[in-house]
Image (spheres, rainbow, N blue to C red):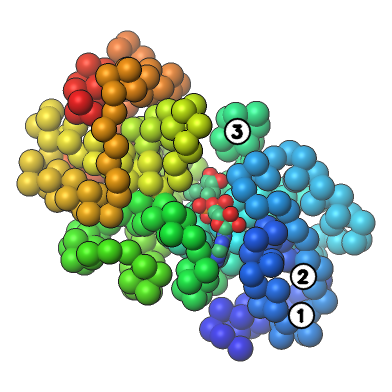
Amino acid sequence: MNKLVAELQHQLRERQVRQLVVIADATVSALYPHYWDELSQEFPTIFMEVPAGDASKSLMQAERLWQQLLAARCDRDVFILNFGGGMVCDLGGFVAATYKRGVRFANCPTTLLAMIDAAVGGKNGINVQHVKNCVGTFCQPEFELPCDLSFLHTLPEKELLSGFGELMKYAIIGSPALFCELEALERLTPGHIQPEWVDECISVKHEIVKRDPYDLLERHVLNSGHTYGHAIESLFAEEGRPVAHGEAVALGLLYESRLMAQIGQCAQADASRVERMVRRLYHVPAFTEDEVLRLVDFMQQDKKNRDGHVHFVQMRGVGDVSPDCRVALDLCAKVIR
Ligand SMILES: NC(=O)c1ccc[n+]([C@@H]2O[C@H](COP(=O)([O-])OP(=O)(O)OC[C@H]3O[C@@H](n4cnc5c(N)ncnc54)[C@H](O)[C@@H]3O)[C@@H](O)[C@H]2O)c1
């Protein structure tokens, strides 16, 4: 029995859980059909499956899960385990937070992004039409499980790079020492991801969430790289060549650090360190003038932005950020050019 399963067994015993529901997406359940075999000998377990992909973060899938919970006669004592990437953690967390006004749950993350970000912090939710995370709750899992990094060995390269974008973000917002370690990385394979890096990201997130659990201000620093990142995601989606979220965030970190250097908030040396790290691992596209204008247009559509300005996380240097910094639109375009 590995460390993760042993810890879950201990936690479920402590809570005298009698009914366990494991929610997974189809890819993860096909890859790991026997992961819970030992545990389910002790705890009667029902497996529920949703299609893989962010489209499953929907009211339709949430309702299907509520119906399956009802059909299985799950009462408020049921324990839900979300087994998968950020999509399953968000959907399963939302279903758990709302079924019979809330039942206990925990996350077992299987992507790098979920290990360091989505499985931690108590936010969950579903998308409505094209609006991401439009409906959801703040609801903490009962406990956090140790991460099993062996899951990363089956992860497609693009998903590993996506998670790494968020990992860089955590280093930039809260861990200069981690950033130095990442700078030594020449290429990225699952074997390169160190358990201490994952732990460090989780502790940076815990610290921020503790100070601002309901995302009123300080937690906004978790959006580093996301202002450009969301615009890049939207542009590429519109062009029919979608880019993974964390990869867009990595590019966003590059442009945001350039921008902060441009307005004199961040030392050029720190911005250059970010740029070098992003370029070493990611393809940085050359945007046409038309694309630059569309990117700026996407940034302007963000509801936080008014009066020809865009709101960013302020980066003063690696490990030194604060929530809010307004920048004029023309400068936002200039740093992409
Ligand atoms: N709640 C939060 O705080 C928070 C934070 C960040 C992101 N998110 C959400 O997380 C989601 C993105 O998470 P994600 O990147 O993990 O995406 P995901 O859950 O869709 O997983 C990406 C792909 O990897 C597959 N997969 C998962 N684990 C695997 C494994 N071990 N081996 C092979 N394939 C595997 C999945 O089936 C899927 O196809 C988004 O919906 C985002 O909004 C939430």
Ligand 1 shows up in the quarter that is bottom right
> Foreground: 82 or 209?
82
Relative to 9, residue 145 above or below:
above
Place of residue 152 in the rendered image (x, y in percent of width and height, measured from the top left): 48, 68
Place of residue 327 in the rendered image (x, y in percent of width and height, measured from the top left): 24, 23
> Foreground: 191 or 99?
191
**Disc 2 designates what residue?**
20
Cβ atoms under marks 1 and 2 closer than 8 Å: yes
> Foreground: 274 or 81?
274
Give the residue displayed 90% in from the left and 61% down from the top. 72
Going from the N terminus, do you reach mark 1 or mark 3 first?
Answer: 1
Give the residue displayed 81% in from the left and 68% down from the top. 46
Q: Quadrant of residue 310?
A: top left
Relative to 105, residue 96 above or below:
above
Residue 61: numbered disc:
none
Q: State the residue lying farthest toward the top.
A: 307
Say what amino acid the circle numbered 2 marks.
Answer: Leu
Q: Is residue 147 in view from this perspective?
A: no
Going from the N terminus, do you reach mark 3 or mark 2 first?
Answer: 2
**Disc 3 designates what residue?**
134
Q: Quadrant of residue 259?
A: top left
Q: For mark 2, does the 10 Å Cα neighbourhood hold few (<14), some (14 to 19), or many (20 or more) residues?
A: many
Tell me: 32 left or right of 220.
right
Could you tell me how far apart the alpha carbons at marks 1 and 2 are, in whole angstroms?
8 Å
Going from the N terminus, do you reach mark 1 or mark 2 first?
Answer: 2
Place of residue 320 in the rendered image (x, y in percent of width and height, measured from the top left): 20, 48
Q: Is residue 171 in view from this perspective?
A: yes
Q: For mark 1, does the 10 Å Cα neighbourhood hold few (<14), some (14 to 19), or many (20 or more) residues?
A: some
